[in-house]
Amino acid sequence: QGRDLIPVLSTGEAAPRFLCSKSNSFSIFQDQAEQFFRSGHTNNWAVLVCTSRFWFNYRHVANTLSVYRSVKRLGIPDSHIVLMLADDMACNPRNPKPATVFSHKNMELNVYGDDVEVDYRSYEVTVENFLRVLTGRIPPSTPRSKRLLSDDRSNILIYMTGHGGNGFLKFQDSEEITNVELADAFEQMWQKRRYNELLFIIDTCQGASMYERFYSPNIMALASSQVGEDSLSHQPDLAIGVHLMDRYTFYVLEFLEEIHPASQTNMNDLFQVCPKSLCVSTPGHRTDLFQRDPQNVLITDFFGSVRKVEITTETVSLDSDLAGFESNLPKDELATEPLKYAEQLPVAQIIHQKPKQKDWHPPGGFILGLWALIIMVFFKTYGIKHMKHIF
Amino acid sequence: MPRPCWARPWCDGGRQGLTLPAVSHYRLFPKALGRLVAALGVQELHLALTQGFWRTRTWGQPPLQAPAGAELWVWFQPTVMDVDKAWKELSNILSGIFCASLNFIDSTNTVTPTASFKPLGLANGTDHHLLRYAVLPREVVCTENLTPWKKLLPCGSKAGLAVLLKAERLFHSSYHSQAVHIRPICRDASCLAVSWELRQTLTVVFDTFSSGQGKKDWSLFKMFSRTLTDACPLASQSKVYVDISPKNKEKELLEVTPTPASVYEAIVQGDKRTYAVYDLLSPSLFNTSRSLNVQLKWKRPQDSSELPTPVLHAQRYVSGYGLQTGEISTLIYNTHPYRAFPVILLETVPWYLRLYVHTLTIITKGKENKPSYIHYQPAQDRRRPHLLEMLIQLPANSITKITIQFERALLKWTEYTPDPNHGFYVSSSVLSALVPSVIAMKDVDVEQSPLFTSLFPSSDGSSYFVRLYTEPLLVNLPTPDFSMPYNVICLTCTVVAVCYGSFYNLLTRTFHVEEPTRGGLAKRLANIIRKFRGVPPL
């Protein structure tokens, strides 16, 4: 599912150095090869989680949908995005414009759109389901769209938003996930080789506490506020009646709207996105676990999708003759007499339906004991000589 | 546990059921559903996702009604050994395809009806143990459910009638119901071969008054904010039917533009109806303009009630006070002037409302009405809901009232939803009836009749089959205060720490007398000054 075509050039950092002395043109190819595979990932995934329920938390759903929109626009397909929304705002009876979620006042940008696929809805967004999605320990009957099928060459973007505190994030007003649990989940992902690099963005109050405990390699984390600070919302819309977005995600969305799939903007620009003058809180980031320099990490490494394309100039001819194909299909058997539709309300049949047979269970201990007692008392009073009359 | 056929007294070992063809042509039929039907041995599948409630008394008889939330009922083929396992897998796979929380369907909300929900397609005998029915009344329907529904169509939403279906307009409505029906049907009139049919229906009720129009005139552009431009190239039939039936035998009450090429008259649901037909495949339709915008204008202002009262309609409500007991009442109205007919009522009540069947009363016209057939399956806590099915005879022109009392159970604290004060839903009850039609219906050729009349197979012309749903109920269960465990822990720990801590200190610490220290330099200087002032030293 994630394996795209690997071009003819060599893979990874182990470029064939023994060939570089041969000719100048080949070293150009080798540089291109190294640049091509600088990041080392072959597919991109995104897990976007909104953890808040109730109408007044409209802004958290709008946050998550804005990131979903940017990520889809930059190329990650729906099959590689796991979107978890804890409540439905678009078709909420209190929404004056149904099937829309706006991110800017005066209803400029509808981030819900017409082509949205929500994988985990409403009551399904729980801590257990979130951790199962991350670690891959999912019940076997889960459909594909609800799984994170990443491998060791996947770059994963994880975005979480909601209400949080020092060291925890609240899920749906009834349970919490702690930073220790999250760090352990990432370690499980690392040990099972479920990611190549991971970008973790969190937009909650005291968000920086959530990434304090990470200890697995190749994780970069961004948060909207430091410990002890609150993340604030951007602006209310008087027609809808609630705050539409949080400040940090609003400015991140503005920043992402400038990015296109071929941009070379790197992570250092993302770290500068919301200074204290605009955001009121101080956004933080953590890069010590990340092996590459953030200067060399492109935004599209995480927000966009890798498409390695091999261009060929050969022509491929399609078989236009389908007559043989049609005749190979199995012929259906014909019935001997005309079939008929079932009767919708067969009154006579219903009334005379056979009474449902009860399943026969062997008698339980109590019944057996009772009968044994009765028989014992009987033979005690009347004597054993009557037994021959019974049997 | 599944028992083999020879151990089940009601299983006809010899009957194999219908031999259904394999689903293999995916040119038009979507592969996702085809593979599902083949892998799990499904004979019929009906899934409906609905937002809103159909108001039968003001809007008339619905063409096809569905209960609020998600409704799924499936007939499995007799070759399926473990029906419950197949049912669970089916609901999980459908939840992935339609982005709905159908994975919450389990044994606590699944029932096996014995008299209702007979197969709508071809069937050879009906063993009701192959049927499963479940409703999720709390399910929300939004754009993410409409998107995969549109993607199942061969042309998607790019061509044909589906270009009109934009989510922003469709969900701004009083009622929105989308459904998917898969069933085996006769391939042609002789009915010797079987084909699979996938039918997708979308029923929407727009409220022109609330969306700012003010008048009852409508047009496609006003409703959908776009017009039809062409037919889907893969379609063999693409038609728009507009109901222009004259009320009270008056003509010229309304005007439809553009002028329809043909008019179709039929008896639909016991009523004589006239339809204006626009065939998108006919080349003359798009001659003058590239788009088709059907408009309807009323010549005279209309008063409010023009729709005739439907013959059968029902209402359900919960009564009682407090959080201990209550009563569910269902009222069924038969407004036919002289004909009586039977109706099957199916009620599914969750296990946490404990029904008392000895309080079940059915009263018609002041007298008790004994049902001809009752099937009651009591609930098992946390395993199975209540199932009550009754076949009741409704006399002509009467109101039947069915009441049953219940008691509310206390749930374990982990079983409450994150928003328990919203209440808990009881799914709609289902009424299935063969309603006698006022006008006799002729046997119509199935090929010629429009698609919206051919879902329910009709056996004779004197009655038509209708399936109605009542309102879902919202009951409050006794809800604990979820912040109390935290409060209790804080309070108890404080009390224990203060009392026990003090006692521990008193009993285990040894006390020494502390010699006053000489003090530092500053203290000695201060003491000298104080001695001079005559104040006691520090």
Image (cartoon, rainbow, N blue to C red):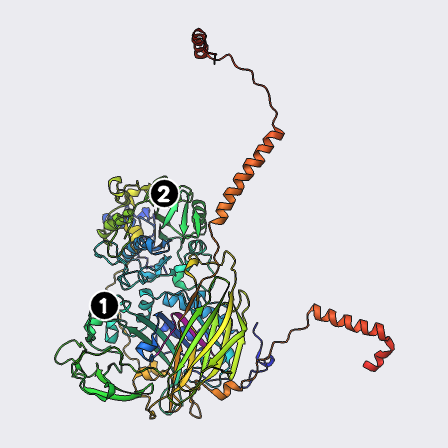
Q: Are dots 2 and 1 in contact, CB under 8 Å?
A: no
Q: Is residue A289 magenta?
A: no
* Numbered disc 1: secondary structure: loop
Is any part of residue A324 visible from this angle?
A: yes
Label 1, residues with CA under 10 Å away: few <14, some 14-19, many ≥20 = few
Q: Which residue is mark 2?
A: A206
Q: Which residue is mark 1?
A: B211
Q: Is residue B68 magenta?
A: yes
Q: Is residue B384 left or right of residue B423?
A: right
Residue B495: x, y in percent?
54, 39
The disc label shown at residue A269, or none? none
* Numbered disc 2: secondary structure: loop
Is B435 situated above or below A277? below
Residue type at mark 1 is Ser
* Chain of the residue under label 2: A
Residue type at mark 2 is Gln
Residue B261: x, y in percent?
18, 86
Residue at left offset 45%, top offset 62%: B476
